[in-house]
Image (cartoon, rainbow, N blue to C red):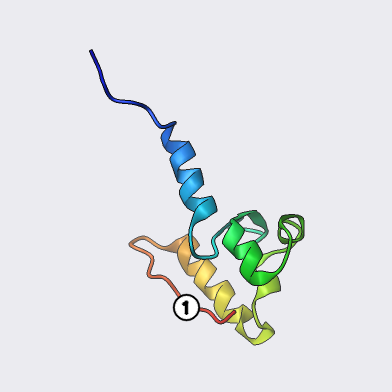
Amino acid sequence: MNNSKSNGSPNESEDLIFELGPFPMWIFDMETLNFQKVNTEAIRQYGYSQKEFLSMNLKDIRPEEDVPRLEKAIQDMVTREGIYKESIFRH
């Protein structure tokens, strides 16, 4: 007899961690930089609705002078062979 209880699939757990995380998080398309999914904290902190976020891309929430650095960081992620080191950006 197995007494363990299932609390849902691993994907459901990951979705909850993403959605209820204490920090703004998003998933974006690496080619277009368009947002595909944002969590509740991103919506709260940035002040955009989910619908607004999903019509935007990463460049829309960055200061204009930081966009070249953002584009380089994304390119480095795409072409990396090793572990990606996170970048810090202004908001």
Q: Residue at x 57, y 75 (%)?
A: 70
Find residue 32 and report its horizontal and vertical position in percent. Answer: 67, 59
Q: Residue at x 64, y 77 (%)?
A: 62
Residue 41 in sight: yes
Task: Name the side, left or right, on which 54 lies relative to 42.
Answer: right
Q: Residue at x 68, y 83 (%)?
A: 64
Q: Residue at x 50, y 65 (%)?
A: 23
Specify the quadrant of the image occupied by residue 2.
top left
Task: Name the side, left or right, on which 2 lies relative to 55.
Answer: left
Q: Which residue sits furthest bottom?
A: 65
Quarter of the C terminus within the rendering: bottom right
- Count of marks overlaid on the render: 1
Task: Name the side, left or right, on which 39 lies relative to 1.
Answer: right
Camera-side residue: 20 or 15? 20
In this rendering, is residue 91 above or below 5? below
Q: Which residue is mark 1?
A: 88
Residue 59 in sight: no
Q: Which residue sits furthest top?
A: 1
Find residue 68 and report its horizontal and vertical position in percent. Answer: 60, 80
Camera-side residue: 6 or 57? 6
Q: SS class of the residue under badge 1?
A: loop
Q: Amino acid at mark 1?
A: Ile
Mark 1 is surrounded, within 10 Å at the Cα level, by few (under 14), some (14 to 19) or many (20 or more) other residues, namely few
Q: Which residue sits furthest left?
A: 1
